Image (cartoon, rainbow, N blue to C red):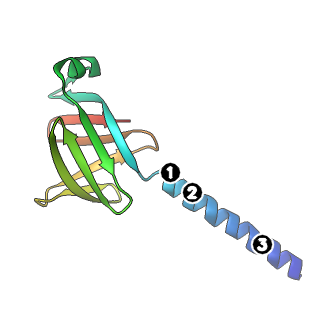
Amino acid sequence: MRTGKRFLALLLTFALAASLAACAARTPSGTYSAVRVVKNGVETSMEELAQSGATISITFDSDGTGVLRFNAASEPFRWSGTTMTSQEGDTMVFRFNGKTVTLERGDTLIEFQ
């Protein structure tokens, strides 16, 4: 009986660890570079952006802060779950699939990897 309880406790521990690992994989961390930009339904290739000298990136820090950068301009934000809040209080929702961050802001969609 005691062995059965220990085995069950061990299985539950592994299941909890696997669940936490799966959740962590769905949380962005680090810096991502833009790979696709669509504004007003018109897609701009990364080659076109690179030729113009434009760079776009987003950073998610583990403390719930981050920075959206466009060239030399930067916009700090706080994030929780899938919501980003700018210093001015504006909110944006993003999606993260474990690899790609998708941010929609007004008529602009930006995908980062």
Q: Residues within 10 Å of mark 1 (few under 14, many from 20)?
A: few
x then y, percent, for residue 60: 34, 51
Question: In the image shown, does 72 or 113 lie closer to the viewer?
Answer: 72
Q: CA distance from mark 3 to mark 2?
A: 20 Å
Q: Quadrant of residue 88?
A: bottom left
Mark 2: secondary structure: helix
Q: Amino acid at mark 1?
A: Ala
Q: Which residue is mark 3?
A: 8
Which residue lies under the disc numbered 2?
Answer: 21
State the quadrant of the C terminus: top left
Question: In the image, what residue occupies the spot 68% across and 69% down?
Answer: 13
Q: Nearer the viewer, mark 3 or mark 2?
A: 2
Any part of residue 44 in sight: no
Q: Is residue 66 left or right of residue 105?
A: right
Callout 3 amino acid: Leu
Q: Secondary structure at mark 1?
A: helix
Image quarter of residue 107: top left
1 or 3: mark nearer the eye: 1
Say whether residue 56 is left or right of residue 73.
right
**Disc 1 target residue:** 25
Callout 3: 10 Å neighbours few (<14), some, many (20+)?
A: few
Marks 1,2: beta carbons within 8 A: yes
Residue nearest the observer in this picture, 68 or 80:
68
- Disc 3 vs disc 2: Cβ atoms closer than 8 Å? no
| Label 2, residues with CA under 10 Å away: few <14, some 14-19, many ≥20 | few
The residue shown at (21%, 42%) is: 69
Q: CA distance from mark 1 to mark 2?
A: 6 Å
Dot 3: what SS?
helix
